[in-house]
Image (cartoon, coloured by chain):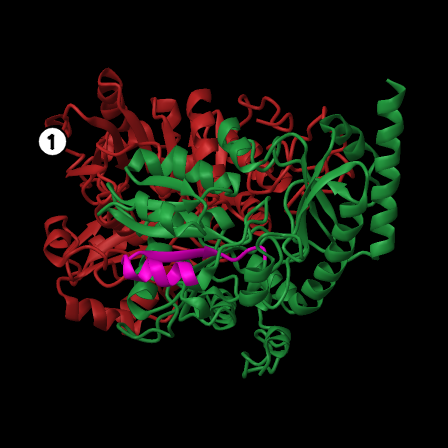
Chain colours: A red, B green
Amino acid sequence: MSDNNHNNQSKKFATKVIHFGGEIDKQTGASSVPLYQASTFHHFSLEDLPDYDYTRSGNPTRQMLEDYIATLEDGIRGFAFASGMAAISSAFMLLSSGDHVIVTEDVYGGTYRLLTSILNRMNIETTFVDMTQFEQVKGALKANTKAVFMETPSNPTLKITDIGQITDWAKDHNLLTMVDNTFMTPYHQRPIELGVDIVLHSATKFLGGHSDVVAGLAVVATDELGTKMKQIQNGLGNILGVHDSWLLMRGMKTLQARMEHSEKGAIRLAEWLSNHPKIKKVYYPGLENHPGKEIHEKQSRGYGAVVSFDVESGTEAKGLLSRVKIPLVAVSLGAVESILSYPAMMSHAAMPREVRLERGITDGTLRYSVGLEDIEDIIQDLEQALY
Amino acid sequence: MRIESRLAQIGSQADPKTGAVNYPIYHATAFRHPKLGESTGFDYARTKSPTRTILEDAIAELESGDAGFACSSGMAALQTIFALFSQGDHLIVSLDLYGGTYRLLEQTMSRFGVISSYVDTNDIEEMEKLITPNTKAILIETPTNPLMMVTDLEKVSRWAKTKNLLTIVDNTLLSPYFQRPIELGADIIIHSASKYLGGHNDVIAGLIVTKGEELSEKMFELHNSIGAILGPQDCWLLMRGMKTLALRMERHQENATKIAEYLLEHPMVDEVFYPALPSHPGHEVQNKQSSGNTGIFSFKMKDARTIEPILRHIKIIAFAESLGGVESLMTYPSVQTHADIPKEIREKVGVDDRLLRYSVGIEHVEDLITDLSQAFEKARIELEGR
């Protein structure tokens, strides 16, 4: 980590998210990190090699972002990638041919596709399990198991995995633990504090927060993993560009403010949906009847801004999507604008229908990512769309 | 239209709504669906994004291919291509290879069971010996970096077809302005677009071009699944650079040829490796398959001890990695770009501690020669004074 990352572990999150070490440019005092749009760096001498030599290997703007996320996640070292999938595929590149990995069954569709259409050909074996069932996780262990991949709350049914329990068990078996922390962000949930080795983000979502940058981040818990991850990031070259690194940092400064606001709306929306006669089921970890609520509260400081619900059938879902006026009907989530997604045809389209249904993602399941609009407007809009 | 015109007009007629002569930068990550099951052609920016599409279509067309893919670096482009292969597959690869490609093959792909053999890709007899039932592709750099070995693309891709191998060509050093390997039979082109295509040492990017529908579809899947895409700002910067590619390549070539000729005559220089020189073994093939020469070449000093003072005394020429920019850069391959290749392999091809690589910029050629000449002279005096 660069010297910009001064020790600020003791600060509260709201302060850390602003004063992360890069809020002031050391050279000029500028109130925002400059964009070093340079691909290469002059070597002033052969003996004294510079900190940065080539932007794929390291860039001052990207470094600031990497230090920023490491600070927020209380990790050792951060890495910025071209997309969430680039970050996730890099983490899996730590494995080798013949290795086996245990993965949460309702994992993001893109991660599922990576494991079942590319990494399988490289002889990386995957067992998908319901991670809310600890027995299933234990039962999946094989002699060649090397890693456990968690996503909690999961997407889109917000199932809760007990991070600490699985991590403790994984450590006993020398397994690498990875958590996709996209939905909670380090504001709510910091898996490294629970013993996890690698935290991954689609930073396109809540961290960026403005639907204007595609990015991925990884944070590791040890120096050893940091060295390995650095080799992979530099070797594969799937880095985040300079401009996007800067935009992401700009978004991250308002993470807490945005999350707090959206979450209030999400709680209200989840309650309203629970009482609506046309809604068959609501998924939100803040609801009293949500399975795993207690575990979630133990490991996370909040519930997030994504609410999923089941309107019974594909026809109902499609009707609702054609009638809503406020949310963007689109893939993605975690933005200032509300986004309503239809997992069956969007984020989970890569998953075969029978597998999808098995995982509880029905044809009537919709996912609402609550933005910064007024929640009463959002509810009114849904009310008219649900007639 | 001729290539100069097509380059100058990349994206300039692609925005009918406003008529803007430069295509806008679409930063959006998500795209509203007009109706369920309907799409504007854009859903999620990792999969497809408007600004990136303009760049991808442009490079596909310039390289005479069917589809283009923009990646976050040249290495990311290679990584995406290598995902075509599976455990047990075997590749034949240029012996004199970019260090990053070697590292990717030996440190990462090997762990996933993809095995590579390194060979002079002009030597078909030798390649025949290496071929196994699992051999899937041949990866060619021509000219190679840094020793500028030239492979006959037509001959080798014809041979590769008879063996059912994909021919992958790294076209970074010549760019489609001088060389279009797909027209000579190649299946996949890869670029470190950070170099001549971008041309300003200000953007890291990689490009892939594929020929054929099936290969293009496969690559689309891999590009989207692995997600090592290029961001919109960088796509735009890259297109901005590409508009002047023709002008820059002409000047790079002109300057490089004059400086190579100067060095050839210099008493402190042992050898100059540049295909534009009639003495270069690949000169004829190069002239047959390319309409010009790259702006980089390598040269060997007689005495390795002169390298350190030369790098210290050059004033206009920057001592830095990378190549292909408007500004001149000098690289010391054995400690920089090729440091990851084991010493015995490096020295087998001739990348030793006497070798320097010079990426000639578009400055005035007399200033560049004066800079070299004064640095050489100071190095000579320092050595004599020891």
Q: Which residue is mark 1?
A: A136
Name the residue located 61 percent from the left edge and 31 percent from the top edge: B352
Residue B3 located left or right of residue A256: right
> Compared with residue B173, is residue B319 higher up or lower down, i.e. above or below?
above
Which SS class for mark 1? helix
Name the residue located 43 percent from the left edge and 70 percent from the top edge: B65
> Compared with residue B61, is residue B359 higher up or lower down, i.e. above or below?
above
Q: Let me know if residue B308 appears in the view.
A: yes
Name the residue located 45 percent from the left edge and 36 percent from the top edge: B103
Q: Let me know if residue A332 appears in the view.
A: no
Residue B314 image point, x, y percent: 82, 39
Residue B10 image point, x, y percent: 58, 73
Membership of B158 in magenta stretch: yes
Name the residue located 22 percent from the left edge and 55 percent from the top edge: A309
Foreground of the two, B259 or A191: B259
Foreground of the two, B294 or A361: B294
Using the rendered view, name the quadrant where residue B378 is placed. top right
Chain bearing tag 1 is A
Residue B176 image point, x, y percent: 55, 66
Residue A185 located left or right of residue B21: left
Residue B312 located left or right of residue A107: right
Using the rendered view, name the quadrant where residue A185 is placed. top left
Tag count in the figure?
1
Foreground of the two, B228 or A23: B228
Task: Specify start and end residues of the magenta stretch as a single range.
Answer: B155-173
Q: Amino acid at mark 1?
A: Gln
Residue B304 image point, x, y percent: 71, 28
Specify the quadrant that holds the N terminus of chain B: bottom right
Q: Residues within 10 Å of mark 1 (few under 14, many from 20)?
A: some
Membership of A130 in magenta stretch: no
Using the rendered view, name the quadrant where residue A277 is placed. bottom left
Foreground of the two, B315 or A250: B315
